[in-house]
Amino acid sequence: MRTRFADSIDGLTGGLAATCALTVTAVSDATNALLDADLTLAERVIDASGALENDATTWEQRAFSLLPLQAPVAHDLRVMVGGLVLSATYDAWVDSPCT
């Protein structure tokens, strides 16, 4: 049972890392679109923000669903709480350059 929980935590960590990497790309693209007045790139960033927001929401839901399943140890809690903080601030990362 604990192995399955650990695998779920690993999946959360990987999903969060992927979402963060895509977010970094989106913010970089938004910055470049602004600096270069590139409307096409700006529109791509706006279009991608919905999918990234869905990824962040899915991650948050998975994290909350895992908490009651086991007694998470300190490392597990740090992963989940850190991810929840990142998920909570996600809108500021992607949406602010788009507005």
Image (cartoon, helix red, strand yellow):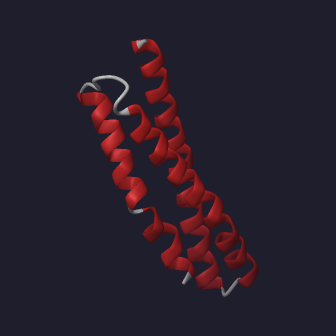
Residue 88 at x, y percent in the picture: 39, 59
For the C terminus, give its image quadrant. Answer: bottom right
What residue is rendered at 56% in x and 67% in y? 28
Q: Residue furthest bottom?
A: 37
**Residue 74 picture location, percent across and down:** 23, 29
Which residue occupies the foreground of this view, 37 or 72? 72
Identify the residue at horizontal 52%, vertical 69% (top origin): 94
Q: Is residue 41 above or below residue 6?
A: below
Counting the numbered discs, the total is 0
* Residue at point 65%, 70% (across, down): 45
Q: Nearer the viewer, residue 48 or 35?
A: 48
Which quarter of the picture shows residue 90? bottom left
Front residue (pair 37, 87): 87
Quadrant in which the N terminus is drawn: top left
Quarter of the view holding residue 31 = bottom right
- x and y percent of residue 93 in the render? 46, 67
Identify the residue shown where x is 48% and y is 36%.
12
Tell me: 88 left or right of 95.
left
**Is 36 placed left or right of 7 in the picture?**
right
**Residue 77 x %, y %:** 29, 34
- Farthest residue in the left direction? 74
Residue situated furthest right in the rendering: 40
